[in-house]
Amino acid sequence: MITYYKKIKKLRSITRASIIACQNAMIKSKGRLNLAINFLINNSNNRKKNSLKESLIICRRNQNQNKAVAILIATETDFVTKNEMFKKLANIILEVALFGKKKKDILKYKIMNKLPLFQIVNYFSNHILNEYIELKQIVFIEAPFINFYIHHSCNKAALVGFSNYISKNLSKNLAIQLVCKTSKTSKTSKTSKTSKTSKTSKTSKTSKTSKTS
């Protein structure tokens, strides 16, 4: 028979949740492991809906400058978005995202053939940053030449694809104009969360369709 403490240890290995969270889940589920797992998942989903108020957008393109990706990562406070460990995690996600197009495939990707990315995100969330973190959005584009721009606030960005190579300064200026234009149209939004999402999605749509010869 598996003892109570062994169940908590197994629950932690499966969910990567904290000891306190696992103990609470075991109490709520009356020692039943499967129910404890479901409890942690549901609790995590509720927390996700209510607590994610800040976000960070970062972009990267490959060496050939014909593929680029932008990711939006959400957190609970702006304190975490400024944390160096959080930025390291964001860059790990970005590096993987550059070679994958679907969110679920990116999160399942094993770093150094060991841990899947979603477990690393959970570890950072529960043991290092102590805040919920979620990969909210991924935008991936391919074109003969790509450039991008990230606003200084790090919550707005544009990826722009071109059918031919143009100067880096000109291509970046076009990306800057897209971000500024989107910002002006998004000011009418009443909710900051909605405006952040619309800024990203509008930019993404524009980026994919804006090819200049």
Image: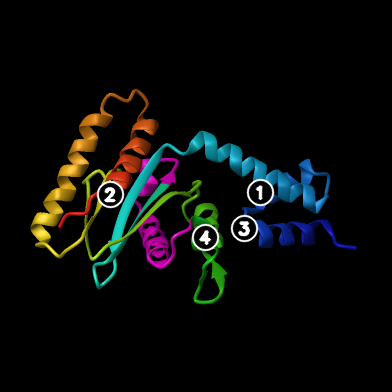
Q: Examine the residues drawn in magenta and state their main secondary structure.
A: helix
Residue with the mark numbered 2: 209
Sequence order check, earlier mark of 2 and 3 = 3
**In the depicted view, which residue is nearer to us: 92 or 96?**
96
Sequence order check, earlier mark of 1 and 4 = 1
CA–CA distance in space, label 3 to label 4: 15 Å
Residue 103, how many percent across, how many down?
Answer: 49, 56
**What residue type is disc 2 on?**
Thr
Dot 1 falls on a residue whose secondary structure is: helix
**What residue type is disc 4 on?**
Leu
Dot 3 falls on a residue whose secondary structure is: loop
Residue visible at 49% across and 62% down? Answer: 106
* CB atoms of marks 1 and 4 within 8 Å: no
Frontmost of labels 4 and 2 is: 2
Residue visible at 31% across and 38% down? Answer: 199
| Residue, far bottom | 113
The quadrant in which residue 39 appears is top right
Residue with the mark numbered 3: 16
Colour pattern of the rendering = rainbow
Residue 189, how many percent across, how many down?
Answer: 32, 25
Decide whether residue 88 is among the magenta residues: yes
Residue with the mark numbered 4: 107
CA–CA distance in space, label 4 to label 2: 27 Å
**What residue type is disc 3 on?**
Arg
Magenta span? 74-102
Sequence order check, earlier mark of 3 and 4 = 3
**What residue type is disc 1 on?**
Ile
- Could you classify mark 1 by the number of other residues whose Cα lies within 10 Å: few (under 14), some (14-19), or many (20 or more)? few
CA–CA distance in space, label 2 to label 3: 40 Å
- Could you classify mark 3 by the number of other residues whose Cα lies within 10 Å: few (under 14), some (14-19), or many (20 or more)? many
